[in-house]
Image (cartoon, rainbow, N blue to C red):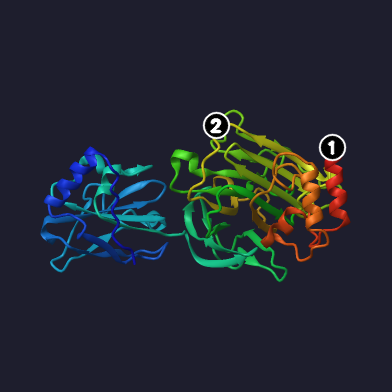
């Protein structure tokens, strides 16, 4: 299931440690692996197998990650004995139901007497770096038992109790998360019994820099004041980068009458990291699109009425905002997440279930934050017109070919006169 890993960075201290490990009998022949990992959300023992060492001379050191790292089986008794046949067993749910929600499990093979008190973890953000000199096995567990396909991507459906945000109960029921006949995603907060259940999906992929597009087919200004819709990136293992969290969030945060939307770079309470805006549905438009272009030098947000287009008409734009502050995280292991949840786990003030429909999600690369800038050189000019000419009358444009190399500006499927008109509008503005 999981194989032994070793990391050997270079340096004098590293060479000394490698020498010591090999003379102690713990060298490249030593291996540790998992033979059984309990499924996410369940109780059960973690089991594994060790090879390449004298078993009586070593112990297994296990940690789980639940909003921080914790020793297992307990903080006071962190070492697991290896059986005469090289097998070992560790109870990783001694802390109760919260332990079943561990999203990462790691086990190190260490010599007797090597353990240090500094290796006791009680919710720490990271493990001591010196542990990785020892052979180890690790595994990530997505907080889900059900998967769906939406917008051409695979997503895990979150499930569990007393989980963030909130804390809330999250259900993977088809009553909470489903795809309808049009391919639209439905997220719902339900009340089937004495508990309220929220919903969240998590992408299997980590996309990195690029353009993230969320098209919503629901009014957001009618959400109960205790309900938040979140569309965001998240990396559970990067507290040093504020979990790589970049958000669209919709809700009034228990303040009726407040603006409904906000763009956020975490930490949200740092000056300049949050921008709020309102959405006016009096014109009768139900669909809104929200675009975030994440680059090393900044993050550009834009919201507008209607479906996604590369060059939205100026009158359709709700709001845009460009963030160039210091909290722009580097890409890493972040996933895209979409959730509908209750603030502090409190019931809706109207005591009613709530539902949001997400029409589409797209991830695109090479997209400029300036409409009409097809070449992505930060200008709208003859170079862009030349690209339209090259693709003129091309059909079959879609998100898989980045809308005919970004020339199908209205995303109609064909490069035609309407795209030329849209380009000319922004060219004249330039």
Binning the other alpha carbons within 10 Å of mark 2 as few (below 14), some (14 to 19) or many (20 upward) gives: few
Q: Which mark is residue 326?
A: 2
The answer to whether 336 is drawn above or below residue 257 in the figure is: below
Q: Is residue 168 left or right of residue 214?
A: left
Q: Is residue 219 left or right of residue 198?
A: right
The answer to whether 184 is drawn above or below residue 325 in the figure is: below
Query: Along the line of sight, which residue is nearer the eye, 218 or 27?
Result: 27
Instruction: Write down the residue under mark 1.
Output: 429
Give the quarter of the figure containing the C terminus: top right
Residue at the image position 40 percent from the left and 50 percent from the top = 66
Q: Earlier in the sequence, mark 2 or mark 1?
A: 2
- x and y, in percent, of residue 268 in the image: 57, 35
Would you say residue 372 is visible in this rendering?
no
Query: Along the line of sight, which residue is nearer the eye, 177 or 288?
Result: 288
* Dot 2 and dot 1 residues touching (CB under 8 Å): no
Q: Is residue 190 left or right of residue 98?
A: right
- x and y, in percent, of residue 96 in the image: 35, 56
Q: CA distance from mark 2 to mark 1?
A: 31 Å
Query: Along the line of sight, which residue is nearer the eye, 25 or 374?
Result: 374
């Amino acid at each position: 299931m999981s194989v032994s890993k070793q990391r050997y960075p270079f340096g004098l201290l590293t060479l000394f440690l490698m020498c010591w490990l090999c003379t102690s009998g713990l060298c490249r022949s030593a291996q540790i692996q998992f033979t059984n990992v309990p499924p996410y959300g369940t109780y059960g023992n973690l089991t594994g197998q060790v090879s390449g060492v004298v078993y009586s001379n070593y112990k297994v050191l296990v940690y789980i990650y639940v909003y921080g790292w914790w020793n297992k089986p307990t903080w006071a008794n962190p070492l697991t004995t290896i059986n005469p046949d090289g097998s070992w067993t560790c109870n990783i749910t001694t802390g109760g139901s919260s332990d079943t929600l561990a999203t990462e499990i790691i086990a190190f093979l260490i010599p007797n007497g090597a353990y240090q008190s500094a290796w006791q973890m009680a919710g720490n953000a990271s493990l001591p770096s010196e542990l990785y000199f020892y052979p180890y096995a690790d595994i990530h567990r997505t907080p889900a038992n059900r998967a769906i396909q939406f917008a051409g991507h695979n997503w895990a459906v979150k499930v569990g109790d007393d989980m963030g945000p909130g804390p809330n109960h999250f259900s993977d029921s088809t009553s909470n998360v489903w795809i309808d006949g049009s391919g639209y995603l439905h997220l719902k907060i339900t009340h089937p019994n004495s508990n309220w259940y929220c919903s969240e999906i998590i992408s299997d992929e980590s996309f990195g820099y690029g353009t993230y597009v969320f098209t919503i087919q629901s009014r957001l200004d009618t959400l109960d004041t205790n309900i938040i819709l979140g569309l965001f990136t998240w990396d559970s293992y990067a507290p040093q980068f504020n979990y790589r969290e970049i958000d669209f969030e919709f809700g009034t945060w228990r303040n009726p009458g407040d603006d409904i939307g906000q763009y956020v770079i975490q930490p949200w309470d740092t000056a300049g990291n949050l921008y709020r805006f309102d959405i006016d549905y009096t014109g009768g438009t139900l669909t809104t699109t929200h675009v975030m272009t994440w680059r090393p030098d900044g993050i550009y947000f834009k919201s507008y009425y209607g479906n996604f287009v590369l060059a939205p008409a100026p009158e359709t734009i709700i709001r845009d905002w460009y963030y160039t502050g210091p909290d722009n995280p580097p890409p890493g292991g972040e996933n895209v997440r979409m959730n509908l949840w209750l603030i502090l786990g409190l019931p809706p003030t109207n005591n009613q279930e709530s539902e949001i429909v997400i029409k589409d999600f797209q991830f695109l690369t090479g997209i400029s934050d300036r409409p009409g800038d097809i070449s992505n050189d930060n200008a709208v000019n003859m170079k862009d017109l030349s690209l339209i000419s090259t693709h003129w009358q091309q059909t079959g444009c879609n998100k898989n070919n980045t809308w005919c190399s970004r020339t199908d500006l209205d995303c109609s499927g064909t490069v035609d006169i309407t795209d030329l008109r849209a380009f000319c509008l922004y060219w004249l503005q330039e």
